[in-house]
Image: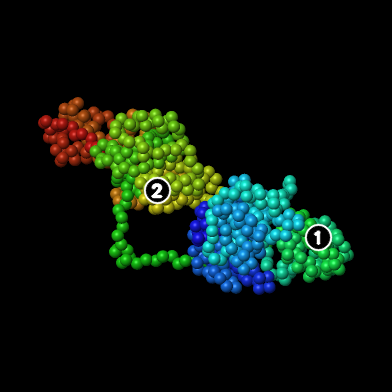
Amino acid sequence: MTLDSALGGMCSAVRWFLYALEWNAQEGKYEKFPCPSDGREIRINAADSANWMTYDQARDALARLPRSGAKCYTLGFWLTPDTGYFFFDLDGVNSGGVLTADAQARVAQFPGAMMEWSSSGTGLHIIGRTLSPPPIHRTRPKRGVDLSYEFYTGGRGIAFGLTGEANGSADSIHDAAVRALITDVFTAPTAGEVVRPEWRGPADDDELIQRMLAARESAEAAFGRKASLAQLWRGDAEKDSSHDMALAAHLAFWTGCDEERMHRLMLRSGMVRGKWTTHRTYLSLTINKAIAGCANVYQEPARPSPKPPAALPAVRNASELMKRKFLPVQWAVRDLLPEGVTILSGDPKIGKSWLVYQVCLAVASGSILWGARLPEIEGDALYLDLEGNDRRLRGRLEVLMPAFPNADLTRLHYATEWPRAEEGVKQIAAWLRQHPEARIVVIDTISAFRDPDPGRKSAYATDYAVGEMLKPLTREFNCAIVLVMHNRKQASGDVMHKVSGTQGMTGSVDNVLVLERTRGDIDASLHVNGRDIEDESELAMRFENGLWRCVGDLADVQRSKERNSVMEALTQIRSGTAREIHEAIGSDVKISALRMRLSRMVKAGEVVCSGGIYMLPENFAPPPIPGV
């Protein structure tokens, strides 16, 4: 059975890294340390989530590195209590393919658990799940139990074997077996016991000794006012039990409580005395007591991985560009809202939310938005009404529904609460993945979505980041994202300058719609501009009873209104000079502008002029206001 199949849910956890293995012929086993994904001989901090990968990424990286020999690599997994997995490491239990009697009993104790050989081939790994985890730190067998077993559920890295084969499943649950194992083999933790961090340091003894002796921390501060480590190492201290314990306490810290290594280094120190060898258990008892009292261990600073050279920007050829075929731009609302990030800006309380709600309803139901338009292409719509509530949304929907009598509302989705900024973007991405036919997402308003604390960014950079964080979604999912916001209070002749914020706001998005209406007036204008909108346009809009409709091109409608005012004046006075018509209109239009308007209307046959007297032609019928 392959390791892939046995790992189960561990494959979906983003906690993977690589171990570098180097064969220690003297010890007859591999020495290991966590390394970067390219196999460089740099020790990384395996507990740092910044160094974790997905299982697929780790497996692909491993495929490019040697899997056997004196120097090779294997998969690593950082275990924490929230994963729910345990790791039972049985060292030295395989001799010529035959397990020790106790190891066979332990295997029988965990039926169905994942099992694999260690990298050296002499140890066995058992991995499974426990719903009621024991202590998270590594535990050691009880005193008098002569077994090289370790058990932990967190704070350690798992170095998998080299064969790529395993039996059973890591997802199998073994609560009863774990409780029995802890009772039978391992010492239960005492109340308030401190969990030690993971040790990080050099594997070579000589290098470790150099670091110990070069350290500036005094023994008085760390080890109960005994002699310094340098003095103890040289043997410049009285050779008694208290100084033996002081040296053992130092070595527990520097070796990460590695009992075997502590024993080896103690015998290299200048404190060696006859009692250590003639008294069979003295040195072991001293070392174990030092380990029991050790609450902290050495952790060398993780070396930052050197940054790889930056890849050259992709430079392409214009001739090849002309040969490429591109899909047409997808429109959420035809000729009005293309795919991309769009700002809809307008003064407060003039109907922006009504407009985007109407748009979402038309898209979700595949209905006609207004007037003589064709039905919109149906797709899912998400309306984030971050300043509204369910009651208001229900009330507005009841107002809109008569204009959409056969609308199916199942594809119209909404929320009144949503995470902000980057987390909010992640949640929108998740929703879009669940709704692959989505065509539009509306965020109303962007001020309730963006990060309220920009930190030290400039105002321009903060505004520009709004569109930049949403653009990748529109490119990945080919949808429109509409950001509703307010116009600035200052007047401006350039419609783009009416959008609140710096130019970073309009510069970061693909399209800008600006809605202008005098509060209380039913007529309004909608300015439409964007990168994928070929012709900038201004639409004449009308807002009546909660429903928006477009009544035509703004210039045409305004021109029609001007001409209708002349016809209405002539209907009243029947005929008259330009000045008499001007007085009848009663507007602030200049007489010179009116004379030019009358001249155009005469040429169009809309007005008859004789001797400076204007009148309507016979059988006159005023033209209707155009609609779309």
Q: Quadrant of residue 352?
A: top left
Q: Residue at x 30, y 53 (%)?
A: 328
Q: Quadrant of residue 27?
A: bottom right
Q: Earlier in the sequence, mark 2 or mark 1?
A: 1
Q: Give the number of the mark in front: 2 or 1.
A: 1
| Residue 578 in view | no
The chosen color scheme is rainbow
Q: Position of residue 391 (x, y in %)?
A: 43, 29
In this orientation, which residue lies closer to the viewer: 402 or 517?
Answer: 402
The numbered mark at residue 341 is 2
Q: Residue at x 37, y 35 (%)?
A: 354
Mark 2 in CB contact with mark 1 (< 8 angstroms)? no
Answer above or below: position of 170 versus 368: below
| Residue 284 in view | yes
Q: Indicate the quadrant containing the C terminus: top left, top right, bottom left or bottom right.
A: top left
Q: Which structural element holds mark 2?
A: strand
Answer above or below: position of 11 versus 73: above
Please tell me how crowded label 1 is: few (under 14), some (14-19), or many (20+) other residues with Cα within 10 Å. many
Q: CA distance from mark 2 to mark 1?
A: 69 Å
Q: Looking at the picture, which amino acid does disc 1 mark?
A: Thr
Q: Position of residue 248 (x, y in %)?
A: 79, 61
Q: Looking at the picture, which amino acid does disc 2 mark?
A: Val
Q: Which residue is mark 1?
A: 286
Task: Kindly give the residue lying farthest to the top in the view shown.
Answer: 572
Q: Residue at x 85, y 67 (%)?
A: 278
Q: Position of residue 564 (x, y in %)?
A: 22, 33
The numbered mark at residue 127 is none
In this orientation, which residue lies closer to the viewer: 491 or 68?
Answer: 68
Q: Residue at x 26, y 36 (%)?
A: 371
Q: Which structural element holds mark 1?
A: helix
